[in-house]
Amino acid sequence: MEEDYMSDVFLSQSAQVKPGLLTKSQKRKINDGGKGRPQAKKKKVVEDEKRKLGLATPLSLENKGFALLQKMGYKQGAGIGKSGAGETNLIPLVLKDGRGGLGRSSFLKEKEAVKTAQKHEQQTQTLTDFIQRKQQSQIVMRMEGDFRHSQQACEQLDKELGQSIPTIPWFWASPSPLAEDEDSDESSDCEEEPLVAEKLATLTDYLRDNHFYCVWCGTSYESTKDMSMHCPGNTREVHDNF
C-alpha cells in the first residue's frame, strides 16, 4: 500500500520537525511509517540461541562422527562402549567467560588460598607473640615482688642480729645512710647493677645460708639440714610444682 502523503498521520509526523532539519533516524522513521528499524540482537544472545538450538537438535547421519559410530554398531540412545553400558548423555559444555588464559581461574584460587593461609599464620603468630609478651611481663612482675619481699625479710633478719648496714646495699629495701654515702663515693665507671633475676638469686642464697630463711616458704628453719628436709628448693617454680 502506497503512503498517502496527504493523510493526517503523515502530516502530523512532518509537522513535528522543520523542513531541512531532519536527522537520518527521523527520515528513516518517516519512511518506515513510524515503526523504525528493528533493533539487532547482541552477538552473545545470538550465539547462545544457536548453541541451545544445536544442543536440542539430535545428531543425524549428516554428522560424520555419528555416522561412523552407527557403522560400528552404535544405536542412538544406547550407552557407548562394547557392552553399551557407558554414558548415554552428551558431555556438558563448560563455557569460558573472560579473556584469561586456561588455568587462570585455578591459579587465582590457589593464590587466594595461599594468601588466606599466610594471613591466618600471621594472625596466629601475632597472638602467640602477644601471649608470650604477656607471660613474660607477668613473670617479671612476680619476680620483682619476690625480690621486694626478700629485701624486707633480709633487712628485718639482719637487724635482729644487730647488723646496722646491709651486706650489699640493695639487700635491704631501705639502705642505711652510711650505705648511701658509700654508694656516692663509688666511681662512675663501676660495674653495671645486676638484673632483678640475678639480684633475687643472690639474695635468696644469702637468706638461706645466713638466716636459713626461704622467702617462698615464709619460714626460718633451724638449720641447713632442717631446711633441706622441709623446703622444696631455692626457686619459686620448685615451690609452685611442689
Image (tube, rainbow, N blue to C red):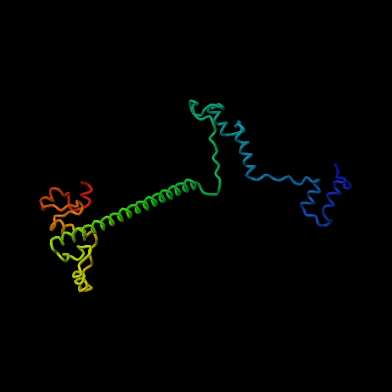
**In the image: residue 33, left or right of residue 73:** right
Query: Is 62 in front, or is 186?
Result: 186
Residue drawn at (77%, 53%) of the image: 24
Residue 87 lies, in percent from the top left, at 51, 30
Kindly indicate the quadrant of the structure image that contains residue 162.
bottom left
Query: Is 133 in front, or is 128?
Result: 133
Query: Is 13 in front, or is 71?
Result: 13
Residue drawn at (83%, 57%) of the image: 20
Q: Residue furthest right?
A: 6
Residue 54 lies, in percent from the top left, at 61, 36
**In the image: residue 61, left or right of residue 154:** right
Q: How many marks?
A: 0
Residue 193 lies, in percent from the top left, at 23, 66
Is residue 68 in view from this perspective? yes
Kindly indicate the quadrant of the structure image that contains residue 1.
top right
Up the image or down, 62 lies above or below 4; here it is above
Residue drawn at (21%, 49%) of the image: 239
Residue 59 lies, in percent from the top left, at 60, 32
Is residue 202 in view from this perspective? no
**In the image: residue 239, left or right of residue 24:** left
